[in-house]
């Protein structure tokens, strides 16, 4: 099996050398390069074509969080494992939200480096429960902001049809549902939007960009 190729970004020289030594001892991994900042990360990606990035969060010139965002603008898929001193701070959360695949505490590198690399390469996301909760909470808040009335996908479709001026019969035909189902959806839409007529519902939907 071909070894997984890795690029390392870490500005602490002693830690960087320690990680490099560990990687060289593992026949399943191949270190392609080690850098003290990620300023050239996208050109490294293009020229070296690594399978994985190991990325410190705090670096001079450009932070690991900024580097993750830069990578994700051109490559959505490459696993990026963050290296950090603290596991419950805003930096880690920001890195995950920017597109990091997971992170490894620096104090656990000697014990967990290889298992964490294996986990992200297999599609996993190593992170502590506290950060996982922060990420889930953020996603739920975002969903509530994007869909403040908690309309279901089908209700949104029906509301969109209604906004186009389609009759109940046309909506039923378009979505292959019965007239009674259309009426049921529209009743629920009125309840959720706190309106009492089609005109009010459509006006609210358009003004608040719900459709």
Image (cartoon, rainbow, N blue to C red):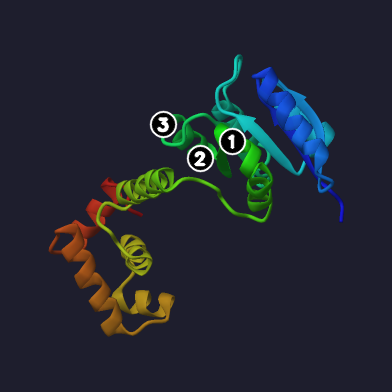
Classed neighbour count for the residue bearing mark 1: other residues with Cα under 10 Å, few (<14), some (14–19), many (≥20): many
User: Residue 209, labelled with which disc?
Assistant: none
Instruction: Identify the residue under disc 1.
Output: 82
Local SS, label 2: helix
Residue projecting furthest to the top: 61
**Contact, mark 1 vs mark 2 (Cβ under 8 Å):** yes
Cα distance in 3D space between marks 2 and 3:
10 Å
User: Which residue is pictured at 27% across the width and 73% down the height?
Assistant: 185
**Contact, mark 2 vs mark 3 (Cβ under 8 Å):** no
Percent x, y for residue 173?
Answer: 40, 80
Q: Is residue 68 left or right of residue 6?
A: left
User: Which residue is pictured at 51% across the width and 29% down the height?
Assistant: 85
User: Residue 90, labelled with which disc?
Assistant: 3
User: Residue 96, labelled with which disc?
Assistant: 2
Cα distance in 3D space between marks 1 and 3:
13 Å
Task: Please state which of the two labelled residues, at mark 1 or mark 2, is closer to the viewer.
Answer: 1
Cα distance in 3D space between marks 1 and 2:
9 Å
User: Which residue is pictured at 81% across the width and 39% down the height?
Assistant: 25
Classed neighbour count for the residue bearing mark 3: other residues with Cα under 10 Å, few (<14), some (14–19), many (≥20): few
* Looking at the image, residue 142 lies above or below residue 156: above
Which one is earlier in the sequence, the residue at label 1 or at label 3?
Answer: 1
Q: Is residue 187 left or right of residue 125?
A: left
Local SS, label 1: strand
Q: Quadrant of residue 201?
A: bottom left
Classed neighbour count for the residue bearing mark 2: other residues with Cα under 10 Å, few (<14), some (14–19), many (≥20): many
């Amino acid at each position: 099996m071909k070894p997984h190729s890795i690029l390392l970004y870490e500005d602490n020289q002693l830690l960087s050398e320690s990680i490099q030594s560990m990687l060289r001892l593992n026949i399943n991994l191949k270190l392609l390069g080690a850098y003290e900042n990620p300023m050239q990360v996208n050109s490294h990606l293009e020229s070296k074509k690594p399978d994985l990035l190991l990325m410190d969060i705090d670096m001079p010139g450009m932070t690991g969080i900024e580097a993750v965002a830069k990578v994700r603008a051109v490559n959505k898929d490459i696993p990026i494992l963050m290296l950090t001193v603290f596991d419950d701070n805003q930096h880690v959360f920001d890195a995950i939200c920017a597109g990091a695949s997971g992170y490894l505490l620096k104090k656990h590198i000697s014990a967990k480096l290889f298992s964490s690399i294996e986990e992200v390469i297999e599609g996993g996301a190593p992170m502590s429960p506290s950060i996982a909760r922060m990420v889930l909470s953020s996603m739920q808040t975002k969903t509530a902001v994007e869909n403040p009335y908690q309309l279901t996908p089908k209700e949104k479709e029906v509301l969109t049809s209604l906004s186009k001026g389609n009759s109940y019969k046309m909506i039923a035909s378009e979505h292959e549902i019965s007239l009674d189902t259309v009426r049921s959806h529209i009743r629920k839409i009125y309840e959720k939007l706190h309106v009492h007529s089609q005109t009010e519902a459509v006006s609210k939907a358009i003004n608040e960009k719900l459709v």
